[in-house]
Amino acid sequence: MHIYIYSASEMAAAGIQNGDQITAISWYKLSGFEMSSGRTGTFSIRLANSSNTSYSSPTAWSTLTSGSTVVYSNSSYNPGTATGWIQVSLSSSFTYTGGSLEVFTDWAVNSGSGNPSTGKFNWRTSSASGVALGVSATTVGGVASLSNSFGNNRPDVKFSFTSSGSCIDPPTAGSAISSISTVCNSSVNFGLSLSGNTVLVNNGTTSEDETIVSLNLENLSSGVYFLTLKTFGVSKTDKLVIQ
């Protein structure tokens, strides 16, 4: 049982705005182990919009989860042998409202014989003081309170989300400008996509230091687009809202 919090400033830095819909969460798996043959676990995820910025210890699980929403529950979960980012698609999207976001995870191995897994599941973490709590249990929801700060570490996660369509400074109708920094002359590829479908692809040549790319958008329908520029291993993505 674990809980960790992401501040409003961290969410904003990740590009997630008030009203955006969180659709999936990924954790970074370091070890290539999985559940043993025939064995599974029960894994659930809750999310909550919150004004909290840190946690005190110990705190009751029932108190922490009050007001949270179950967004994923799987009674036969197996993370598999893959390492790297492991994505869990939520059963229902969650609307972020602009404050802190609390993530609750509850995992327990289902009953069975023999070793439940082929080895220990290790996940990548980063230092983050006062924003994570957890405890080990043998059953889902099996401990009354959380008291372990895990050395003030928090799991590294990625949130997948869809935009609410809000934009502070939407581009003026008919054109948009984006720039990408380079260290030498090179080719630059750029593409514009809508809901994962590429609608415009082009390429050009950069000069040293920076290139300005101007696109004519007059013939595109209203919607949220993502403009990606790539050159010499440098990639930049801008969100555009055409109204």
Image (cartoon, grey):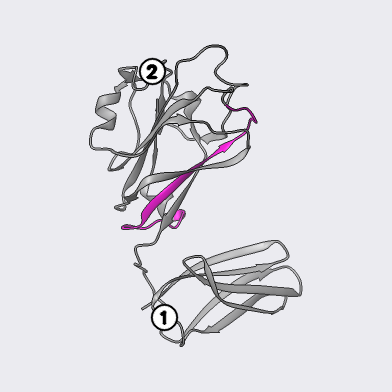
Identify the residue at horizontal 24%, vertical 27% (top origin).
Answer: 63
Residue 56's image quarter? top left
In the depicted view, which residue is nearer to us: 53 or 62?
62
Residue under label 1: 221
Mark 2 to mark 1 CA distance (whole Å): 51 Å
168 lies above or below 9: below
Amino acid of disc 2: Thr
Percent position (x, y) of residue 113? 52, 12
Residue under label 2: 139
Amino acid of disc 1: Ser
Res. 130 in view: no
143 lies above or below 206: above
Identify the residue at horizontal 36%, vertical 58% (top origin).
Answer: 17
Residue 142's image quarter? top left
In the depicted view, which residue is nearer to us: 173 or 100?
173
Q: Is residue 148 magenta?
A: no
Percent position (x, y) of residue 192? 54, 73
Q: Residue furthest front?
A: 38
Q: Of helix, strand and loop, which one carries label 1? A: loop
In the depicted view, which residue is nearer to us: 130 or 105?
105
Q: Of helix, strand and loop, which one carries label 2? A: loop
Percent position (x, y) of residue 99? 31, 49
Residues shaded magenta: 13-34
Q: Quadrant of the C terminus?
A: bottom left
